[in-house]
Image: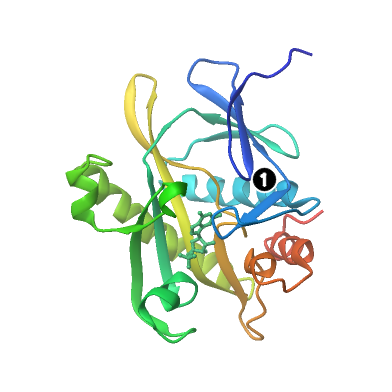
Amino acid sequence: MKEKEKIYEGKAKILYKGPEKNTAIQYFKDDATAFNNLKKSTIEGKGIFNNKISEHIFKKLNQIGIKTHLIKKLGEREQLIYMAEIIPLEFIVRNIATGSLTKKLGIADGTVLSKPLLEYSYKNDELGDPLVAREHITEFNWALSTELDLINNHCLKINSFMQEMFKNVGIKLVDFKLEFGRASINGKKEILLADEISPDTCRLWDMVSEKKLDKDRFRKDLGNVIEAYQEVAARLGIGR
Ligand code: 5GP
């Protein structure tokens, strides 16, 4: 078989050239990093669960009108996707205060927010993905105001949908990170949901016990990391 041509290797995924000009293959690795690459490890099987969970969620989001980069799952670690020009921002949606929000602003961990809080971080490892305002984004041309309006609406719609989806399987959606990109599909310019949605990019707590079922198990050395990812897949009905 022909060697795939690597376009980019990130911390948890590799992007290869796809069969068509505007496509790519997204490969999910088992590598885990935290704290801007200071903590690194390999969690066997993580890539398989993230591929499954992300595919499941992206397909459901597509059904409610969110355009995504997913074309189809190709194998246990691979997805065929539309190639997109990634907007250099992380869109973070929070329902419960924890993580960097509590650290930066001194808000008590576990505070339930009165409504979803949307934050923007500038995707830049050297700067540690700093929190930025809408004004920075438009001033430095990271995204247009019209793009931000559309993406903000998408973020809130995705949050409502995922809160309900996880609630139905006994999980609280605490917070999550989204990435979007610009693509041209059949000659039409589109904003697509890109990257992944998985326990690597969400905080998921068991509804009753508040047991963490996400990457915080790795970040905080809580153990049983892969078991948590497996449990999320199983509860969503896509376990092995
Ligand atoms: P925090 O800002 O509290 O560290 O993260 C908020 C949410 O966004 C968490 O669900 C976290 O997993 C996700 N998140 C923020 N930045 C990143 C990132 O660089 N990589 C990944 N995988 N998730 C992130």
Rendered position, 132 above or below 180: below
**As drawn, is 176 to the left or to the right of 28?**
left
Residue 169 figure quarter: bottom right
Which residue lies under the disc numbered 1?
51
Judge by depth and name the residue closer to the eye, 88 or 228. Answer: 88
List x then y, in percent, for residue 1.
79, 13
Q: Quadrant of residue 51?
A: top right
Q: Is residue 209 above or below residue 221?
A: below
Looking at the image, what colour scheme do you see? rainbow
How far across and down, in percent of the image, does residue 31 sit? 70, 48
Residue at the (48%, 47%) spot, across then down = 63
Q: Secondary structure at mark 1?
A: helix
Number of numbered discs overlaid on the protein picture: 1
Circle 1 crowding by C-alpha within 10 Å: few under 14, some 14–19, many from 20: many
63, 113: nearer the viewer: 113
The residue positioned 73% from the left and 74% from the top of the image is: 222
Horizontal side, residue 224 vs residue 193: left or right: right
> Is 31 placed above or below 219 here?
above
* Residue 184 or residue 101, whichever sits in front: 101
Mark 1, ligand 1, within 8 Å: the answer is: no
**Amino acid type assigned to the residue bearing label 1 in the image:** Asn
Q: Residue at x 43, y 63 (%)?
A: 159
Q: Furthest residue to the top?
A: 2
Does 162 sit left or right of 233 as displayed?
left
Q: Where residue 215 sits: x, y (%)? A: 64, 63
Q: Is residue 90 above or below residue 142?
A: below
Q: Is residue 76 left or right of residue 14?
A: right
